[in-house]
């Protein structure tokens, strides 16, 4: 389980994955009520210190570390200790879960009904469940599911209940609290609530981190949170947040627990419930505020078919094994452990690295549906494709994806055409087949011109919805695709030249994709190996050359990255051309959006994905990281200072990656 | 007795030449034997001790024909008794089997001992000076090791590595001065030898040493030179063995109160050289609190203070260069120690706690209130069960009925889980009234942590375990079980975490290294201080199926030490560093700290005459 072995299998195809069981099958054949009321006796952590949820709060409030911060805060702000302590108690009250089995049983019953209506099946790898059961007994467990939908954490608890495993406590965003009844229900099913931002609030941080650590140390329950911090609206994994990961690792660093098991969980949906909602959000239609009435209105989704979903519990990753040789725990020997300490640079780097590894593990075990391949192909052919061509290319892409180690759920015994037609049928809101041609469905505006903003917007919704499926497979292709683009750009086949190009691109896109920091060489070698294996390139002593049959593969890979190259270029272009002196950071996205829309409407840009606010934000983050743009804080406002020369040269370099982009 | 001595003389054919000093010390013996011997015999302890195991030759555990464990000999409380539950515990804990034996080589194969590499002129001058010496293989092998597992394991297998080339027996301070002078003159390597109970590879001869290695055995410097009743001090030669010192002082109504677990065999000089700690340090203090004056012979000359003032502000205390120097700077020859009147009353006691956490919390509170008895130790559950397995056969039905009743009361009535409960053992000392008062105070504190008084007998058995544990290791080694103990000291707030993590690390490492059966991994808190505690670990496993058990063992012990350091524990509380833990010294005392120690060594012993290569 050591860190090295996580990626030691160089050939991803050899990676053994578990089989799935459909948990809904039994639900369809027996009473939900009896299921909800059945005897629930999970195996517990061997070092469990039994305590009730209320007891937990008083342990936290009396803890040395919280008392220390209370003292500190009271000295700093001049309030009395009691007042600060009272404040801490209120914060904890707002935060804490009240996990009750009754509520879980209620959810077990209602969710059974809902899941049966929504999904054809909920498939779980039972071996993963068994591993988890072992892990829970051995050491405190942290569950790290991927986050694509509100369904995720309900589903997690539902599955754990189904398999008689300890129910997790879940870190949730404050958003839910506003949903009066539902918020409390979630609280009673194990959710605890954290504010989205509490930057410098020492007391809040102390309450929060001590609460989580106490639960972890005492083995109270598995702790569940989302590494990505929020739901990914794009289907791509988000750059992991390390705050909570830092907190759950600290008890190990300080020797308070022997080890902690991190369990990555990959949850994949054949069709995402929030599909078009996300696309609209990316285009600037604000996310509807969570409200109970909104939830009730969303009932109509119950009548639709969302295909099946897969939940894959990965191998538990031992923090102890990961930290071996990287972290010296004795660094905590000289300071009382209850005094809060900022993590050292070493620790921070380690936690960050671990976070990336874990997200990659999530990605690896995401189940890909045939539709993902179709969406990839359709996006590369915006004017639609003949069904026969699509079928042919899908079969080709299937083989390529498998060679790259894709976890593809492609029905074995059915003819290719049938698989494709049923995929298309499930996603009939996104694609349609007419006259043997497959194309994206775009909401038509009655009697309006096709070149208006609204028409453009509607098309963008379709493209972005589709892209959210294509994006699911990007983690597989991104490294080889970076090489493909690099080979094209380098103008020479020398390996070191190609690597330099690869490294540059990798650097630019490291906010966009999950690329482990500092692993450029490893990524390069891995991708070279894959490209060599599928016969696209030949690796010689000094050179990397395209093989004769490699043209198709490399061209395909280049076009996979194309929307991102174009999108980043548009952002650079905007910053160079359009910017007035003081651009406020919060005005950036709307401004780029309207700039991009103008380019599209004028016909000089075909790439609708450039409209995605996610891409625009990532591009900005990359520019800031590359020091081409500077954030300047003035009071409450943040303005962006652009180094036009740097941005311009970046745009140029990006332009060189693809000859057709220069026209922009 | 007479016959036995003659026998010993014949078999060992020891040629020993005597100096005048020696004559004096054995005069009475020779007179009583009324023999005139050219082959003379010393009252050497090694004639009554095992050459390849712990302790006295006549005392050992064995499984008799009925498969019951018994302890032979007459020396201990357990001697001659049957221990009915030891077999089940042994087989159950280690997955060992009485059918699978791994016996030791019965006798030392003299031909396997490398011939001595002698510095002839050194030997000649030594003989001329009249110092007793020997180059017999038995004598040299006996002084070539301490009691680390790997050392004993090799001996049992008949494997002999580098051993001293010569053994010398100085009989007084002046002899030592002479020996050290000659050693410097002829550039031979000296390794001081006291009781031979080291568990840090401190006595191992450095294999890279090319000079002649001379073992300087202090055992003949074993007299109490004077007792000063006005100041309550005694001036003692450093070769004296712990139990002899206590016995002889007792005869005058005094004691030092210094009782390390090895006191049957370890020497005063050894205590000073390793910074020893005694069981009853709560009353009497550790060795650094007990010494008033030390005399040490170094290659630069003799180091000592000019007076016996109880405390001085004269720069860094030079005693602290000596204590813990582990034989790298010189030989401690004489020590003035504090003594106390023998206490009027002694009482053992024990407390059962529902779990280890509560036990530690109680010890912490006792330390906080500074009311620790002479000794207070807390055994974890595994060690409690281990102690239980050493219960001798009960003599009457009534006792066994009582035992049953006690067990019922604790587990059923009080609801203690037999797999979690743990026991503290106590020893009170002083005048009777105060002891009883003290006892009540401690039991009252214990009650606050759910502790129940569990009788004197359990307490006493707990302390007995300490003395027989090393004998038990020899029994284990007869049946494919190897083990060792090690210790550390740690701040109070980390005691529980350290114990849990180290125990678990041992279990995990054993598993990863192919040990077939889960190991015994247990600990106890053996000393309490204001700011922390001393923790002692026992670790043993069944090595059947392993091709290189010692290598596995060493890896696990290494990992356990890493774990201790990572959890805020010290490199050693009282065993010392030796060569076994040298690699961590820099980390433990910082580069500058190590440099300071090295510069002292460089000044005192520039040509590395005291070349055991410990510590630095």
Image (tube, coloured by chain):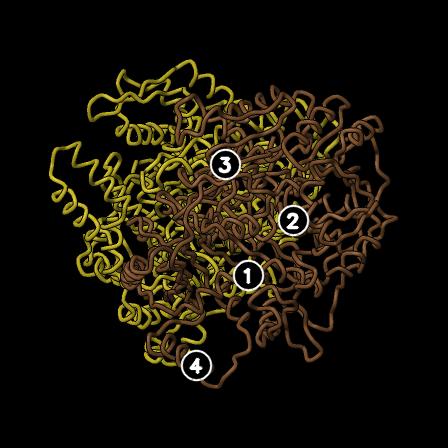
Q: Nearer the viewer, mark 2 or mark 1?
A: 2
Report the front residue among A497 and A610: A497
Structural crowding at the residue carrying mark 4, measured as other residues with C-alpha within 10 Å and reported as few (<14), some (14–19) or many (≥20): few
| Cα distance in 3D space between marks 2 and 1 | 70 Å
- The answer to whether residue A478 shows anywhere in this view is no
Mark number, residue B51: none
Residue linked to disc 2:
B148
Q: Label 3, label 4: how many angstroms apart (C-alpha)?
A: 50 Å
From the image, state whether disc 1 or disc 4 is nearer to you.
4
Label for residue B404?
4
| Crowdedness near tag 3: few (<14), some (14–19) or many (≥20) residues, C-alpha within 10 Å | many
Q: Residue drawn at (24%, 37%), measured in percent from left and top?
A: A202
How many numbered tags mark residues here?
Answer: 4
Tell me the colour chain B is drawn in: brown
Residue A657 screen position, x and y as percent? 55, 26
Instruction: Give the label on residue B336, or none.
Output: 3
Proximity of marks 4 and 2: CB atoms separated by less than 8 Å:
no
Q: Earlier in the sequence, mark 3 or mark 4?
A: 3
């Amino acid at each position: 389980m050591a860190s090295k072995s996580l990626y030691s299998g160089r050939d991803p195809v050899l990676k053994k994955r578990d089989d799935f069981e459909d948990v809904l099958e039994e639900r369809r054949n027996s009473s939900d009520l009896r299921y909800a009321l059945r005897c629930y006796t999970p195996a517990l952590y061997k070092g469990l210190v039994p305590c009730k949820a209320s007891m937990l709060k008083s342990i936290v409030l009396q803890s040395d570390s919280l008392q220390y911060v209370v003292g500190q805060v009271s000295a700093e702000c001049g309030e009395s200790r009691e007042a600060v302590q009272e404040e801490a108690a209120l914060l904890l009250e707002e935060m804490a879960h009240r996990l009750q089995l009754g509520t879980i049983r209620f959810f077990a019953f209602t969710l059974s009904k809902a899941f049966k209506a929504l999904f054809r099946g909920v498939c779980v790898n039972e071996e993963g469940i068994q591993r988890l059961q072992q892990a829970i007994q051995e050491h405190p467990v942290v569950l790290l599911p991927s986050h694509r939908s509100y369904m995720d954490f309900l589903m997690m608890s539902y599955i754990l209940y189904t398999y008689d495993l300890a129910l997790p406590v879940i870190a949730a965003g404050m958003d839910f609290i506003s949903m009066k009844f539902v918020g409390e229900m979630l609280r009673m099913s194990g959710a605890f609530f954290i504010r989205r931002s509490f930057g410098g609030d020492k007391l809040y941080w102390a309450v929060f981190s001590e609460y989580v650590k106490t639960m972890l140390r005492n083995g109270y329950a598995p702790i569940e949170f989302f590494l990505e911090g929020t739901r990914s609206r794009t289907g791509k994994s988000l750059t992991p947040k390390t705050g909570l990961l830092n907190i759950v690792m600290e008890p190990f660093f300080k020797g308070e627990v022997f080890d902690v098991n991190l369990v990555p969980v990959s949850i994949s949906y054949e069709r995402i419930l929030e599909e078009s909602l996300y696309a609209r959000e990316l285009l600037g239609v604000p996310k509807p505020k969570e409200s109970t009435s909104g939830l009730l209105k969303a009932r109509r989704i119950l009548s639709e078919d969302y295909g099946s979903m897969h939940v894959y519990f990965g191998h538990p990753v031992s923090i102890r094994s990961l930290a071996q040789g990287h972290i010296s725990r004795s660094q905590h020997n000289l300071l009382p452990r209850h005094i809060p300490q900022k993590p050292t640079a070493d620790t921070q780097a380690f936690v960050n690295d671990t976070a990336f590894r874990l997200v990659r593990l999530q990605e690896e075990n995401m189940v890909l549906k045939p539709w993902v391949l179709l969406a990839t192909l359709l996006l590369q052919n915006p004017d639609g494709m003949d069904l026969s061509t699509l079928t042919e290319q899908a079969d080709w892409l299937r083989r390529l994806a498998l060679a790259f180690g894709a976890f593809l759920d492609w029905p074995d015994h059915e003819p290719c055409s049938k698989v494709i037609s049923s995929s298309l049928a499930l996603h009939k809101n996104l694609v349609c087949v007419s006259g043997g041609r497959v194309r994206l469905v775009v909401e038509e505006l009655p009697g309006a011109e096709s070149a208006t903003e609204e028409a453009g917007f509607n098309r963008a919704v379709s493209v972005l919805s589709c892209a959210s499926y294509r994006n699911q497979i990007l983690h597989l292709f991104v490294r080889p695709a970076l090489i493909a683009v690099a080979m094209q750009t380098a103008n020479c086949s020398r390996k070191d030249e190609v690597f330099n190009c690869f490294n540059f691109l990798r650097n630019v896109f490291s906010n966009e994709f999950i690329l482990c920091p500092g692993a450029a060489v490893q990524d390069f070698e891995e991708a070279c190996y894959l490209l060599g294996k599928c016969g696209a390139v030949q690796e010689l002593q000094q050179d990397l050359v395209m093989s004769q049959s490699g043209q198709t593969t490399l061209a395909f890979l280049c076009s996979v990255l194309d929307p991102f190259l174009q999108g980043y270029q548009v952002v650079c272009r905007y910053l160079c051309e359009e910017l007035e002196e003081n651009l406020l950071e919060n005005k950036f996205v709307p401004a780029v959006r309207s700039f991009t829309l103008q380019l599209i409407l004028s016909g000089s840009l075909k790439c609708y994905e450039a409209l995605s606010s996610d891409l625009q934000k990532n591009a900005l983050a990359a520019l800031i990281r590359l020091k081409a743009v500077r954030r300047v804080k003035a009071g409450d406002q943040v303005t962006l200072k652009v180094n036009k020369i740097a941005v311009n040269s970046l745009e140029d370099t990006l332009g060189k990656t693809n000859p057709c982009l220069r026209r922009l | 007795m007479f016959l036995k001595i003659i026998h010993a003389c014949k078999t060992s054919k020891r040629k020993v030449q005597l100096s005048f000093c020696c004559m004096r010390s054995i005069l009475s013996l020779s007179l009583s034997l009324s023999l005139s011997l050219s082959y003379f015999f010393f009252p050497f302890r090694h004639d009554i001790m095992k050459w390849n195991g712990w302790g006295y030759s006549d005392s050992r555990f064995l499984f008799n024909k009925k498969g019951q464990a018994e302890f032979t000999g007459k020396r201990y409380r357990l001697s001659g008794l049957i221990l009915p539950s030891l077999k089940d515990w042994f087989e159950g804990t280690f997955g060992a089997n009485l059918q699978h034996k791994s016996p030791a080589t019965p006798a030392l194969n003299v031909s396997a001992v490398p011939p001595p590499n002698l510095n002839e002129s050194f030997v000649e001058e030594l003989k001329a000076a009249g110092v007793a010496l020997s180059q017999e293989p038995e004598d040299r092998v006996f002084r070539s090791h301490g009691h680390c597992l790997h050392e004993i394991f090799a001996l049992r297998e008949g494997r002999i590595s580098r051993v001293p080339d010569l053994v010398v027996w100085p009989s007084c301070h002046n002899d030592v001065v002479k020996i050290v002078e000659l050693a410097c003159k002829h550039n031979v390597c000296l390794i001081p030898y006291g009781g031979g109970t080291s568990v840090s590879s401190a006595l191992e001869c450095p294999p890279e040493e090319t000079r002649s290695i001379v073992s300087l055995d202090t055992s003949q410097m074993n007299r109490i030179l004077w007792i000063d009743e006005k100041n309550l001090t005694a001036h003692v030669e450093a070769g004296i063995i712990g139990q002899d010192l206590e016995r002889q002082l007792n005869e005058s109504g005094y004691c030092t109160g210094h009782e390390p677990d090895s006191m049957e065999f370890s020497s005063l000089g050894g205590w000073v050289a390793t910074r020893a700690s005694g069981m009853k340090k709560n009353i009497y203090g550790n060795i650094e609190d007990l010494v008033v004056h030390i005399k040490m012979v170094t290659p630069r000359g003799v180091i000592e203070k000019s007076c016996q003032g109880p405390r001085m502000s004269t720069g860094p205390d030079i005693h602290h260069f000596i204590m813990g120097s582990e034989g790298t700077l010189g030989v401690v020859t004489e020590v003035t120690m504090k003594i106390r009147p023998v206490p009027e009353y002694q009482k053992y006691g024990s407390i059962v706690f529902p779990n280890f956490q509560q036990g530690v919390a109680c010890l912490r509170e006792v330390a906080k209130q500074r009311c620790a008895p002479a000794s207070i130790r807390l055994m974890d559950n595994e060690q409690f069960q281990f102690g239980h397995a050493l219960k001798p056969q009960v003599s009457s039905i009534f006792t066994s009925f009582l035992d049953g009743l006690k067990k019922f009361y604790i587990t059923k009535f009080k609801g203690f889980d037999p797999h979690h409960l743990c026991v503290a053992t106590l020893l009170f000392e002083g005048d009777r009234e105060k002891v009883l008062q003290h006892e009540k105070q401690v039991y009252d504190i214990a009650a606050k942590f759910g502790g129940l008084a569990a009788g004197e007998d359990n307490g006493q058995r707990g302390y007995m375990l300490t003395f027989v544990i090393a004998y038990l290791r020899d029994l284990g080694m007869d049946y494919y079980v190897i083990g060792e103990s090690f210790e550390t000291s740690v701040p109070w707030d980390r005691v529980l975490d350290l114990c849990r993590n180290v125990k678990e690390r041992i279990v995990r490492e054993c598993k990863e290294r192919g040990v077939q059966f889960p190991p015994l991994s247990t600990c106890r808190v053996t000393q309490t201080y204001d700011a922390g505690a001393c923790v002692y670990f026992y670790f043993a496993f069944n090595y059947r199926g392993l091709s290189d058990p010692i290598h596995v063992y060493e890896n696990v012990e290494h990992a356990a030490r890493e774990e201790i350091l990572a959890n805020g524990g010290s490199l050693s509380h009282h065993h010392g560093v030796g060569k076994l833990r040298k690699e961590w010294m820099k980390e433990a005392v910082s580069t500058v700290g190590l440099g300071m120690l090295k510069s002292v060594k460089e000044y005192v012993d520039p040509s590395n005459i005291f070349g055991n290569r410990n510590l630095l």
